[in-house]
Image: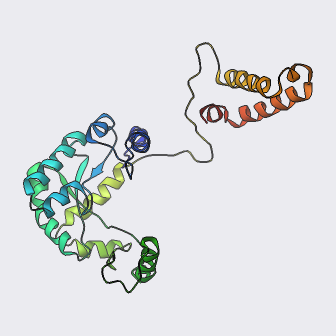
Amino acid sequence: MAENETGYRNLVKLVTAAHLDGFHYAPRIDKEMLAERSAGLIGLSGCLAGEVNSAIQADNIEKAKQSAAEYRDILGAENFFIELHDHGMEEQRKCNSALPQIARDLGIGLVAANDVHFLRRSDHQAHDVMLCIGTGKMVQDETRMRYVPELYFKSPDEMREVFRDFPQAIENTLKIGDRCHLDLEFGRSKYPEYPVPAGKTREGYLRELCYSGLRQRYGERPASDPELIRRLDYELGVLEKTGFVSYLLIV
């Protein structure tokens, strides 16, 4: 999560790198990349598929603690939290029996989380049908992937009841929310600034490229056809006024 503008910029950089440099079936980053862009970020340990919980499920508590310690050292003890989930799953109960002690040993906080896949409990059946469509399975298939009905958006009272033994984990959700202050400007497009040759402006460089493109397409005709020049100047003027020059240079 981005705590501030610095964190947001780092998060954007990490997401971009994950898609452009680390994509392998899914976007990925490594811990070295995270360490380079950790300022302003708050991290949680994740759900059952996360690194910490996967180690606990494999009965390797020491590896789980080591993984959590690495993220603590990267993000800072005040910026990394051990995440608790409870949707009535046996695997979660196993993890939740070990996670509080890991948090205490490492001096980091707990946070209550809710793995939301549909809005209301009553949406479970519709979500189940959608899951079958997405995986190409029949509803009657007993061996297919299934989600439990508890993966809905719970109310604050429901979350307090589920995590009644961990009130500090509930309190930390509010503390994290209070720490996050980021004002995003909507209604205006922002594009990366395209690097142009020294001594040139982006507008001038795009104009050069376009005039060169005219000559490639029409030969010597642009020099004697003012209509082509007027049309090009008009379109370039629109791009300059609307702020799309860098975008056109990039694409």
Name the residue nearer the viewer: 142 or 210. 142
Residue at 67% of width from left, 35% of height from top?
243
Name the residue nearer the viewer: 125 or 81. 125
Name the colouring of the figure.
rainbow
- Identify the image quadrant of the C terminus: top right
Residue at 24% of width from left, 55% of height from top?
45
Q: Position of residue 235 (x, y in %)?
A: 79, 34
Q: Is residue 200 above or below residue 85?
A: above
Q: Is 74 left, or right, of 200 in this rendering?
A: left
Q: Is residue 207 above or below residue 26?
A: above
Q: Position of residue 246 (x, y in %)?
A: 62, 32
Name the residue nearer the viewer: 130 or 69. 130
The quarter of the picture where residue 141 lies is: bottom left
The quarter of the picture where residue 18 lies is: top left
Q: Is 199 left, or right, of 105 in this rendering?
A: right
Q: Residue reaching furthest top?
A: 199
Residue at 33% of width from left, 77% of height from top?
144
Q: Position of residue 15 (x, y in %)?
A: 41, 44
Q: Residue reaching furthest bottom?
A: 140
Q: How many marks?
A: 0
Q: Is 187 left, or right, of 208 in this rendering?
A: left
Q: Is residue 194 above or below residue 23?
A: above
Q: Position of residue 156 (x, y in %)?
A: 34, 71
Q: Is residue 110 above or below residue 128?
A: above
Residue at 15% of width from left, 57% of height from top?
55
The quarter of the picture where residue 123 lies is: bottom left
